[in-house]
Amino acid sequence: MKELSDYLVNVPSKDTPRIQESHILIGHIICQLVEENVFTPNP
């Protein structure tokens, strides 16, 4: 997928559940950052 992606979220593990957990966590972090930037009023 690296060659097809603009951004790669690579979790260096061969343990599928750990990779999935990491991707979920990273997805939540990205959502939080977007929400803070979009919905936080500028002073």
Image: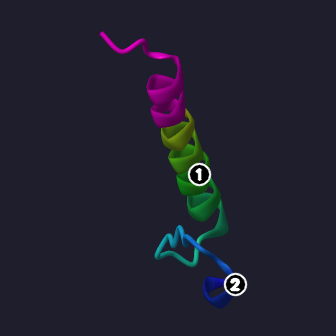
Q: Secondary structure at mark 2?
A: helix
Name the residue at 36% across, 15% down: 42
Q: Residue 36: x, y in percent? A: 45, 24
Marked residue nearer the N-terminal end (1 or 2): 2
Whether residue 13 sits left or right of residue 17 in the image: it is left
From the image, which quarter does the C terminus lie in? top left
Left or right: 40 as drawn, with respect to 35: left
- Where residue 37 appears, as percent x and y from the top left, is 45, 29
The type of residue carrying mark 1 is Glu
Residue 17's place in the image compared with 40, above or below, is: below
Identify the residue at the far front of this view.
Answer: 43
Name the residue at the left extreme. 43
Q: Quadrant of residue 4?
A: bottom right
Residue named by callout 1: 21
SS at mark 1?
Answer: helix
Image point (44%, 16%), residue name: 40
The N terminus: image quadrant: bottom right
> Along the line of sight, which residue is nearer the eye, 16 or 29?
29
Q: Residue at x 52, y 25 (%)?
A: 38
The stretch of residues the image draws in magenta is 32-43
- Label pair 1/2, CB-CB below 8 angstroms: no
Seen in the picture, residue 23 relative to 30 is either above or below; the reply is below
What is the residue that sits farthest to the bottom in this orientation? 3
